[in-house]
Amino acid sequence: MRIQFAEEFALPAREVYAYFHTPADWVRLFGFAGRVTDRGGGWFAVPFKRFPFPLVARVTVAEPHTRVRWVFRGFWRGDGEVRLTERAGGVRVEGYESITMRWLPGPVARLLERSFMDRELRRTWGVGWRRLRERAAGRPQGPAVKPAGGRLP
């Protein structure tokens, strides 16, 4: 399953990048269900609402304020990328996420992707986009915005 996106926000690229810097930072944007576990070597287990297995992900490319690319392992396989383009008055966020269930046969995985995963992953990305729009509008969206490590990259 592959999700592609192109969104614009009245925020600086630096601020949006902070949400994608590591998988541990994703929780602040998407509101995952539980505590992120550092698995070492840059790998993080990120609990995901309505899914029985966490996303185990690692950033493979991190170009500050410009691009982040990641891969999945464990139950999930796939990759994703976010590209940030600074524009007058904000940032354009483009990219994709491609993900499937590693251990299920192709036809079973595709059926689950179409009937459940596609909707849930699009909803999750939608939550993130809504939070960024609320932040741009100056509305509170929960805890203070600080990436893992406590500082903006």
Image (tube, rainbow, N blue to C red):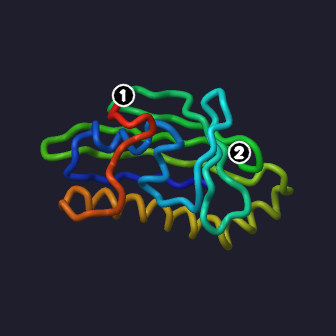
Q: What residue would you read off at disc 1?
A: 64
Is 143 in front, or is 135? 143
Is 17 in front, or is 67? 17
How far, Cα to Cα, is label 1 from label 2?
A: 25 Å
Q: What residue would you read off at disc 2?
A: 77
- Write down the quadrant of residue 53 in the picture: bottom right
Q: Residue at x 48, y 60 (%)?
A: 31
Q: Amino acid at mark 2?
A: Arg
Element on which disc 2 rests: strand
Is 47 in front, or is 66? 47
**Any mark on residue 14, and which?**
none
Q: Amino acid at mark 1?
A: Pro
Residue 69 pos. (x, y %): 51, 35
- Write down the quadrant of residue 70 in the picture: top right
| Label whose residue precedes the other's in the sequence (1 or 2) | 1
Residue 113 pos. (x, y %): 68, 64
Residue 85 pos. (x, y %): 28, 37
On screen, residue 41 versus residue 84, left or right, reads right
Q: Residue at x 60, y 41 (%)?
A: 79
Which of the two discs, 1 and 2, sits closer to the camera?
1
Establish if 74 lies above or below 67. below
> Circle 2: is it few (<14), some (14-19), or many (20+) Cα within 10 Å?
some
On screen, residue 93 versus residue 137, left or right, reads right
